[in-house]
Image: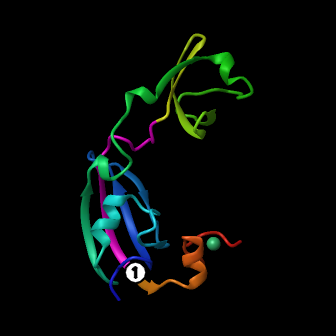
Amino acid sequence: MQITQNAVVSIHYTLTDDSGTKLDSSDGTPLAYLHGNGNLIPGLERELEGKAAGDKLSVKIAPADAYGEYDKSLVQRVPRRALKGIGNLQVGMQLHTQSPHGVRAVTVTQIAGDMVTIDGNHPLAGKSLNFEVEIAEVRAATEEELAHGHVHGPGGHHDH
Ligand code: ZN
């Protein structure tokens, strides 16, 4: 079966940045996802469309089709006291802050005296992503999986 909307797809993958640094991988256990439901970055879903089990692909996804361009307006400097309650503040820490648009993940990128710089961009924003993918399995989704919008069982969503 080919990969189309609502297929359950299991893939082995390795993700590297443009300098060849490994960012992520399936590490021997295939990742299962429901195709066409926004569970993968749009650029990778587009490349996988129409492929079948056993196919291998090597693709470069531009930032706009991955985690977006880097947005400088998402970088803020805040007084350290605004982050009270967070012990042992360190550069590289991920925090969840309350914003008018709900809970947002930010990364601490600088601590200078009493001021802390936080960056609301996804850590991979502005980066081209290089994927080596091998498709392990393609199957039809169950009705329950379709209703939930994600995969159940091995490699998929947690049980609930
Ligand atoms: Zn579910």
In the image, taking residue 17 as reference, residue 30 lies left or right, namely right
Q: Amino acid at mark 1?
A: Ala
Q: Please tell me in which quarter of the rendered image ligand 1 is found.
A: bottom right
Observer-nearest residue: 22 or 128?
128
Q: Indicate whether 105 appears above or below 75.
A: below
Q: Indicate whether 41 appears above or below 46.
A: above
Q: Is residue 153 visible?
A: no
Q: Is residue 38 magenta?
A: no
| Label 1 SS | strand
Residue 116 x/y as whole percent: 56, 19
Which colour assignment does the render follow? rainbow
- Residue at the spot of label 1: 136
- What residue is drawn where x is 57% and y is 18%? 78
Residue at the outermost top position: 113
Query: Within 10 angstroms of label 1, few (less than 14), some, or many (20 or more) residues?
Result: some
- What residue is drawn where x is 26% and y is 47%? 18
Residue range highlighted in magenta: 121-136
Q: Indicate whether 109 appears above or below 12.
A: above
Residue 127 x/y as whole percent: 32, 44
Residue 1 x/y as whole percent: 35, 89
- What residue is drawn where x is 55% and y is 71%? 150
